[in-house]
Amino acid sequence: MIRTKIKVLIADDHALMRQGLKQILELEEDIEVIGLAVNGEEALKMDQQLKPDVILLDINMPKMNGIQALRRLKDMGTDSKIIILTIHDDKEYLFETINIGASGYVLKDAEASSLVKAIRNVYNGDSYIHPTLASALVKEYNKVCKSENEDKTEKLTRREYEVLILIAEGNNNKEIADNLFISEKTVKNHVSNIFKKIGVTDRTQAAIYAYKNSIKKI
């Protein structure tokens, strides 16, 4: 049986980074790099032409940077899942990308396995936030969300608390199900309940909430 490959577009203005990412990703049997863009404008055109499943979008690019390209892609109604590629100095932009709608956040100095996991996660409808990136996101989150002091985690059941911890660790629904020995359907129900109880709309915001409130394993 032939497995469907995840079609990836890489947008980065550095040739070595583009080619390096391409070589790394094409070692995976289920990933195919279908395009290389050198700036945000080119990424927009190639998204429309090639219809990638996932776009790796560098923040710092000429003509149109990653934040601008992300906003335009979302305004255009792209079906592509978007992963932001960033360096430590880019933390001031990270909270903005959450609100715009990026599905993943990966540091450029991360292990190749983290990037591969991020691509697979977002392709399957989940989000991915690299653990070492969380602290920077939390700082920005704290600046915006100063008011709510209520400990919403008190509303969570023990199982929901466990699921939230696993979300914060970057696990997708299948991985959570395997870890807790429950079905994926049950995990989806728990995730939906968690979102309602802590007042978030996606997995990335849930992960940030967990880090912000120092939620740890029971």
Image (cartoon, rainbow, N blue to C red):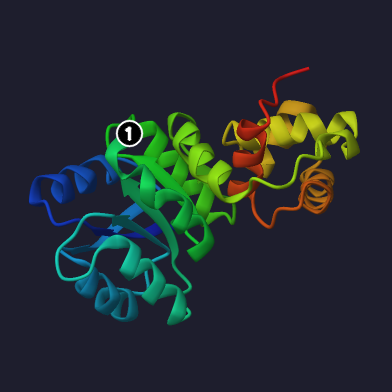
50 displayed left or right of 172: left
Residue beneath the point at 51% across and 44% down: 128
* Residue 207 in picture, x, y percent from top left: 62, 40
Q: Secondary structure at mark 1?
A: helix
State the residue lying farthest toward the front: 147
Q: Is residue 1 among what the camera can see? A: no
* Residue 174 in picture, x, y percent from top left: 67, 41
26 displayed left or right of 156: left
Amino acid at circle 1: Ala
* Residue 59 in picture, x, y percent from top left: 28, 55
Q: Residues within 10 Å of mark 1 (few under 14, many from 20)?
A: few
* Residue 186 in picture, x, y percent from top left: 84, 45
81 displayed left or right of 158: left
State the residue lying farthest toward the top: 218
Quadrant in which residue 184 is drawn? top right
Work out whether residue 203 or residue 33 is closer to the camera in this orientation and state it: 203
Q: Quadrant of the C terminus?
A: top right
Quadrant in which residue 74 is drawn? bottom left
Vertical order, 215 against 185 (above or below): above
Vertical order, 116 against 10 (above or below): above
Residue beneath the point at 88% across and 28% down: 158
Residue beneath the point at 79% across and 43% down: 187
Work out whether residue 98 or residue 140 is closer to the camera in this orientation and state it: 140
Residue beneath the point at 90% across and 34% down: 157
134 displayed left or right of 32: right
State the residue lying farthest toward the left: 15
**Number of dots carrying numbers:** 1
Q: Is residue 120 among what the camera can see? A: yes
Q: Which residue is mark 1?
A: 112
Work out whether residue 136 or residue 186 is closer to the camera in this orientation and state it: 136
